[in-house]
Amino acid sequence: MTLSQSLQNDTASLQEEKPVLRIWGRSSLKGNVSISGAKNSALVLMTGALLASDACQLRNIPDLADIESMGKILSALGVKLQRNNDGLTIDASHIAKTEAPYELVSQLRASFFALGPLLARTGVAKMPLPGGCAIGARPVELHVRGLQKMGAEVYIEHGIVNAFARRLKGAHIYLDYPSVGATETLMMAAALAEGQTILENAAQEPEVIDLADFCNAMGARIQGAGSTTIVIDGVPKLHGVDYTIIPDRIEAGTFLVAGAITQSEITVSNVVPEHLFAAIAKLKDIGVGVVQEDRNVLRVVPGMLYHGTDIETLPYPGFPTDMQALFMSLLTLCEGNSVITETVFENRLGHVPELIRMGAHIKVKGNHAVIRGVPFLSGAPVSGTDLRASAALVVAALAAEGQTTISGLQYLDRGYENIEAKLRGLGARVERIQGQSSPALVGVS
Ligand code: UD1
């Protein structure tokens, strides 16, 4: 095969497989967008359903690739799942297997969080290590050490975390870092343990509270979720429940930034405004008005001039790492200099080179990005490197002059339900092009 034939084949296979999103920027947005259920809550509540001895109905489950993957993992354990109009029924009354398949777990880190409930419910759990990912190493030693403190025997062999415990015992556990996943894993495990567990330096994210509310509705006794100390009194058994998941605060933040960056007045409904406190504070620093119209509706009121601001990502209630990339897109168009410091994940600046392709002025040193505002961005072929990096490119494209073609949609689709329909509903010019080439794809090949 000649080189040109081989390149043609490569390009053709990329054309076949990879859809791209094409966005024509600079349209003003208007109207309302309704936010879907929280992906990160939905994923962990799905693992939480393993704790119940009968079926749970979860409502407000977003239709996402990650939810699909988690469903496959639970099915592989022998759990019965059924999608219905209102959500998802998960029946874990019978758990046939205690080992999750590597191919599925490696695609979805959150599936590792099933370790705690599976162990608590069956006495055995074998979970492949989730491995690294684009945004950093993401270790799991806090999950493992916490379960060991609760009396589990845990060893890692051939890349698999093997955990055994006849019945877990309550323990006093201090987390070195307020990890969301470790807090959730241990809270679920403790719900069925014997005696009292106290988690110190626990994560305070709204998704942790949602999980505690879900478990308590199933009959668990968890207090203090949302603070740094969570106290769990174990019970012998949990029952099925009908539960509605909270709205997705990161999706809500994405649309607030979309309104701000396009200087558009839009409303974002089905949100919990308190969950967005840090993001709203930063929008206001920049010069964007955010008004609460109703209990669960926010209105973006664009200002005349936007100023740069500094942002440091932190565990909740600090500024969320999941909104760092989105705010970077906005800051590229704000007057003056801004500094973003990413403290949660060590490798979460993959969107920087892509934003630079669009005309942004950004310099990275270690975990700091210094952004000097430019008057405009211009459309370009770009590629998303992870979920939120892809979303950042979408909002940048909405503001950019001309046409932007975004590839790497497998990331975007993990976390945004119907994103192009939602954007089109606000008046954006967005098109998903199935299996067609984009300059980015050809360039990459
Ligand atoms: C969750 C969210 C993710 C979000 C992140 C931080 C889900 C499904 N995902 O991920 O979207 O970006 O919280 O808000 O809810 N760490 C350790 N050892 C451990 C566990 C974590 O060192 O055993 C470190 C991680 O490497 C990272 C930091 O803790 O640097 C935060 O990670 P963590 O809060 O655990 O994130 P996840 O729960 O994986």
Image (cartoon, grey):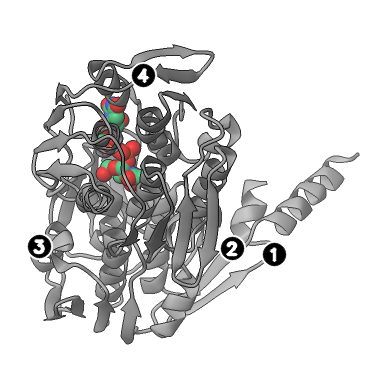
Q: Nearer the viewer, residue 293 or 234?
A: 234
Circle 4: residue type: Arg
> Residue lying farthest front?
236
Label 4, label 2: how far apart the Cα atoms are: 50 Å
Q: Does ligand 1 reach within 8 Å of label 1's beta carbon?
A: no
Label 1, label 3: how far apart the Cα atoms are: 41 Å
Q: In this orientation, does residue 345 appear?
A: no
Rendered position, 201 above or below 326: above
Find residue 31 and report its horizontal and vertical position in percent: 32, 87
- Density class for disc 2 (Cα within 10 Å; few <14, some 14-19, many ≥20) is many
Q: Is there a contact, CB below 8 Å, between mark 2 and mark 1?
A: yes
Residue at image point 35% right, 49% down: 45
Of badges 1 and 3, the one in the foreground is 3
Residue at image point 35% right, 30% down: 120
Residue on which disc 4 sits: 166
Q: Does ligand 1 reach within 8 Å of label 4's beta carbon?
A: no
Q: Residue 135 occupies which quadrant of the picture?
A: top left
